[in-house]
Amino acid sequence: MRADVSPSLPSPHSKIGLVHVRHLRAMTAALRAVDYRYGGGSCRTQVEALLSWCDKAFAHSASAAVRRDFRGAIAELHSLAGWTAFDAGLGGSAHRHFLLALDFAQDEDLVANIRYRMGRVHLHHGGPAEALGMFRQASLIATSHHTNAILAANQAWCYAEMGQRVPALAMLGRAHDEFARGDVDSAAPWAAFFDENDLAGITGAIYTTLGRTVDVSFAQPAITALMQAATGYRDDMTRSRTFSLIALSLNHLVAGDADEAAAVAALAVAQTDYMMSARTRKKLEPLHFEAGRRRAITLKELITPLLEAPSYAA
């Protein structure tokens, strides 16, 4: 990704037009694609540079309609900035960008998506109750079946983390129902990541968590869902595929197949060389712990160098 990701600013006496809004959205889409494939650390600087351009451009005059669209585009970019900061392990920066995104956002489904991302930060850092509250708040304003599917699936994940099997499975069922009623092809750019592969991936993550908090027998349905996700993700969703492979390895290990766990983990590790994502390291930690506990030496030795390497975000 080139360092210069912004269009030329108009002269001080000219207006911001739709061409600038379109360019901003196109660059946001391009940077979002980089994030999906290489991790938030690979494009965070470029996202910040584009936000700097937005700060200058917003001071220019514009028609009411253009300014409304421009605000929405800036909200999308701040939401992406928050997500890339989160993925790079910068929680404070993520929170700041998400709050700015909420200030700029006017589309209710976008607001719901921003709150979903804020919830994911809580969930990642061991706060399922706080995350659940955020997801519920977002569901009150979500306007599409697609967004409601995302929110239901993540509420299911929270319940799983809290060891509550019945509501976890109920919300997971609702997520699948909402997804079937929606249309991924017409989803907004910020929500289009949630396709059949991602639904399978989060289903596998929920079963993985239930296997840890409720009953190890959930490892088998987790394996089924995660295999679907891992084989379905294309190269443009490398980070998501890596996460699914890590979880798949963990479930194979829990199910008693250390050799298959090591083989799957090797596939995940092969993708981490160019993956600038602090979350990848975080997701490897339980696999490393379980490998040590079960004396899966090959698997543990495969993961240990990744956990001992200095963080790029340090």
Image (cartoon, rainbow, N blue to C red):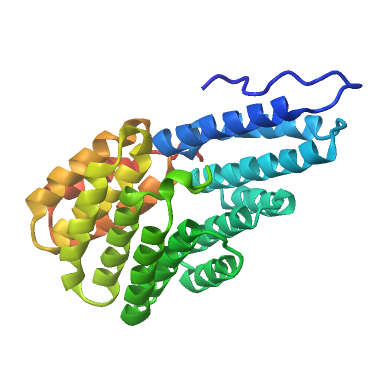
Instruction: Inspect this view and state whether residue 125 appears.
Output: no
Residue 255 image position (x, y, % from top left) = 12, 63
Q: Which residue appears at 63% of the width and 19% of the height?
A: 4
Q: Which residue appears at 52% of the width and 63% of the height?
A: 122
Residue 66 image position (x, y, % from top left) = 77, 36
Front residue of this view, candidates 312 and 181: 181
Above or below, 96 relative to 312: below
Above or below, 109 relative to 141: above
Task: Indicate left or right for 241 with 155 as reference.
Answer: left
Within the image, what quadrant is residue 270 found in? top left
Residue 78 image position (x, y, % from top left) = 64, 44
Front residue of this view, candidates 205 and 10: 10
**Figure label count:** 0
Q: Which residue appears at 63% of the width and 48% of the height?
A: 93
Task: Indicate left or right for 187 with 240 as reference.
Answer: right
Above or below, 277 relative to 215: above
Instruction: Inspect this view and state whether residue 300 appears.
Output: yes
Front residue of this view, candidates 194 and 278: 194
